[in-house]
Amino acid sequence: MFAALNVYKPLGITSHDVVARLRRVFGLKKIGHLGTLDPLAEGVLPVCLGQATRLIEYFPSGKRYTAQVTLGRTTTTLDAEGEELSLMDCSNLDLSEVRLQALLSSFIGTIMQQVPLYSAVHVGGKKLYELARQGKTADLPTRETVIEQITLLNLDHQNPAHPVLTLDVTCGSGTYIRSLARDIGDALGCGAFLSGLVRTAHGRFTTETAIPLEDLQQATDPTTALLNPLQFLDMPVYPVATAEAARLLSNGMKIDPVQAESGGLAVKLKPNALYMAVFEDKPLGVVQLVSQRFKPVKMFPA
């Protein structure tokens, strides 16, 4: 098995639950997901099956979300799952478009973000959420992250005391949207929590092609939903010319680029760049161009 799957994760279950159910669907143990989604979040959850799990680190990590941020209330978990910490009436708060646009723009770029208390980040050898559940406190670490864009899609005043911002956020790996909601509330001086989250894209996986988990569980032949993972990698594919060259790479030997040129294919090689080596359209593994030779980095069993 060497495949990828674009799953639409429903609300109420963990990403690990999705993997557990897919293992039963496909009768396969070796399955892994890209990028965790909290139980109160839904949307795109890319999954790799079989040998493709070894490529997870090479998939593009950029993500896109539609986030709902409710103003005037804070919680222990920074989302709707936690206990209420504070409450404020936002009826008289200045939420003009000019102010909101300026505020949101201040978060675009490379920023330092404090991780949530209820997260899997390790502090002192323990996960933060474990410490939180034990009633213990810890200094929350900060991490550098990148937010490429934030667009205000809607401002809902249905409840004037607690208006809701709907945001379109494009960001890099490691960004906590819960923390972003908290920081927006702090900047407005009213507090806020993340009241809804949909991941609309992860790399080249999007909601347009995502298949609901329930559909996969009920499908007569779920294998029809499987995808070629090479289509979603940010890595050029390089064809190996001969079976002998393929054997050398598979056995951990270096080869010259000429041995990986098929049918006069002209590819401009970049020093130290990673390539996906294939032979007769079958993936051999990840190789790197070092000193004008292809060096095996992560090869797949024959």
Image (cartoon, grey):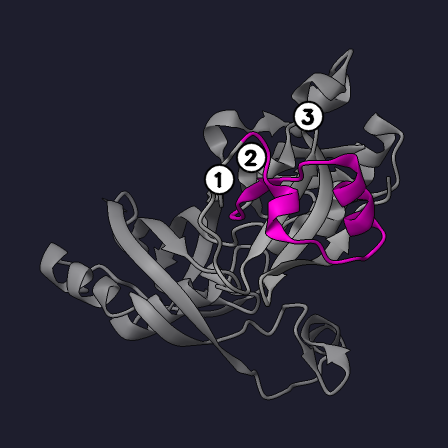
Alpha carbons under labels 1 and 2: distance apart: 9 Å
Badge 1 or badge 3: first in the primary sequence: 1
Alpha carbons under labels 2 and 3: distance apart: 12 Å
Tell me the quarter of the image containing the N terminus: top right
For disc 3, the marked residue is 226
For disc 1, the marked residue is 204
- State if disc 3 and disc 2 touch (CB < 8 Å): no
What residue type is disc 3 on? Leu
Q: Nearer the viewer, mark 2 or mark 3?
A: 2
- State if disc 2 and disc 1 touch (CB < 8 Å): yes
Residue 265 tag number: none
- Residue nearest the viewer, comparing 96 with 173: 173
Residue span colored magenta: 234-263
What residue type is disc 2 on? Gln
What residue type is disc 1 on? Arg
The residue shown at (73%, 36%) is: 242
Q: Position of residue 260 (x, y in %)?
A: 63, 43
Residue 10 visible in the picture: no
The residue shown at (13%, 55%) is: 97
The kind of secondary structure element at disc 3 is: loop
Q: Tell me the crowding category of disc 3: few under 14, some 14 to 19, or many 20 or more residues within 10 angstroms, Cα based.
A: some
Tell me: residue 8, above or below residue 91: above
Q: Quadrant of residue 50?
A: top right
Q: Quadrant of residue 185?
A: bottom left
Badge 2 or badge 3: first in the primary sequence: 3
The kind of secondary structure element at disc 1 is: loop
The residue shown at (44%, 49%) is: 268
Tell me the quarter of the image containing the C terminus: top right
For disc 2, the marked residue is 231
Q: Tell me the crowding category of disc 2: few under 14, some 14 to 19, or many 20 or more residues within 10 angstroms, Cα based.
A: few
Magenta highlight on residue 124: no
Magenta highlight on residue 244: yes
